[in-house]
Image (cartoon, rainbow, N blue to C red):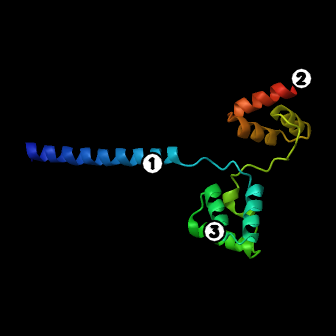
Amino acid sequence: MGLGLMEILLILAVVAAAVGVSLVTLAGRRRGERNAPPPSLHSAADTEQEVLRLLRQGKTIQAIKIVRERTRLGLKEAKDLVEDVAAGRRRLTDHPAFAGMRPSLPRRDTGDLAGRVRNLVAEGHRQQAIYLVRGETGMGEAEAELFITSLTST
């Protein structure tokens, strides 16, 4: 029951093909993740206001596009959601796709980032201050925490 040279070469070719397909599939998945759009920088409340404004103007298609861009929902799900919002059956922000969006930050006209951060922390909104710093500077969470601590420890 010995295997001849041809059988061994055939087995090796099948194994090589399977490994090649696996590597191509894995590379495609990684490339897809790398090219995926970043999470939305818009708040759920801002998105809802923009969608409502577009609906009042009769621009349903633009409203659907906004929802798709900011939530990564499919066309049908985004269309159904916008139609439900237009009919008053639900709020846009009640949909689970909006759970990952950043919360609305209180608007302040205090000028610089440091002043706005200090105001948020003084009002007990440290997490919102972190979101603000990260959104405006591109810092990671640990860096934003350090920045906020250095501003508020004086």
Label 3 belongs to which residue? Answer: 61
Circle 3: element type: helix
Name the image quarter holding the C terminus.
top right
Dot 1 crowding, Cα within 10 Å, few <14, some 14–19, many 20+: few
Outermost residue on the top side: it is: 154
In the displayed structure image, the side of residue 67 where residue 87 appears, left or right: right
What type is the residue that disc 1 sits on? Answer: Arg
Q: Can residue 2 be seen in this view?
A: no
Q: Position of residue 145 (x, y in %)?
A: 76, 31
Q: Which of 16 and 27 is in front in this view?
A: 27
Image position of 123 with respect to 87: above or below: above
Q: Quadrant of residue 80?
A: bottom right
Which is nearer the N-term, disc 3 or disc 2?
A: 3
At x 81% / y 47%, what residue is drawn?
A: 105
Mark toward the start of the polypeptide (3 vs 1): 1
Mark 3 vs mark 1: in front: 3
Residue marked by disc 2: 154
How far apart marks 3 and 1 lie (CA) works out to: 30 Å
Identify residue for label 1: 29
Residue appearing at x 30%, y 45% in the figure: 20
Lower sequence index among marks 2 and 1: 1
Label 2's element?
Answer: loop
Circle 2: residue type: Thr
Q: Is residue 138 left or right of residue 103?
A: left
